[in-house]
Image (cartoon, grey):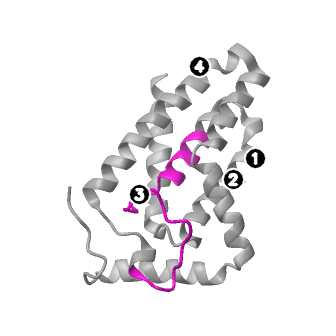
Amino acid sequence: MPRAHADAPLPAWQRLDLRLCELFHDGCRRELRALFRWIGRLGRGPAWYGLALMLLAFHGETAAVPVLRMLVMGGLGSALYKWLKTRLARPRPFRRSEALATEPPPPEEFSFPSGHTLHAVLHTVLAGACFPWTLWLLVPFTLLTAASRVALGLHYPTDVVAGAVLGGALASLALWLI
């Protein structure tokens, strides 16, 4: 597994990515970052398990296949983003900038891609495709999840974009296959 060096010089596009992260972090008030930490905890799994249970409770057997699709693709998404993180070994933004204080520290060392964003987009697309009424809640939560990753100094904007693209691609694949 490659090891990233937080003190290695950055190419120009990565310096811009880091600067955008710093600007977004600095622009968020402390109270907003507290909300983002709470959203991050929900996006680690409880939101998606709760969504699956809610769909089953409201829709019974009709929700069984969509929920199974969400669980299978969620597992595949987890395997994919963890594999990419260890292969690409991109240090998190707070390791590159003292301006990006983060607490608590993330469970994983590397940042690319954002697993939270991948799962938020994946579950939003899959649930919304079968149950459009969920979109009024899931779309704002997904946007807040993506924003939280940058505001907390855990991910660069490009990590979030990559997570969204991967989550959307996995959801599209699942809808096409099943």
Compare marks 2 and 3 and give the one earlier in the sequence: 3
Residue 121 to residue 175: above or below:
below
SS for dot 3: loop
Residue at point 74%, 39% (across, down): 134
Mark identifier at residue 137: 1
Q: Quadrant of residue 23?
A: bottom right
C-alpha gap between disc 2 and disc 3: 22 Å
The stretch of residues the image draws in magenta is 96-123
> What residue occupies the far left of the structure in this picture?
2
Amino acid found under the numbered disc labelled 3: Glu
Task: Look at mark 4 in the image and give the residue it sits on.
Answer: 65
Residue at point 58%, 43% (across, down): 45
The answer to whether any part of residue 178 appears in the image is yes
SS for dot 2: helix
Mark identifier at residue 141: 2
Amino acid found under the numbered disc labelled 2: Phe
C-alpha gap between disc 4 and disc 1: 21 Å
Compare marks 4 and 1 and give the one earlier in the sequence: 4
Pointer 2 local density, CA inside 10 Å: few below 14, some 14–19, many at least 20: some
Pointer 1 local density, CA inside 10 Å: few below 14, some 14–19, many at least 20: few
Task: Look at mark 3 in the image and give the residue it sits on.
Answer: 108
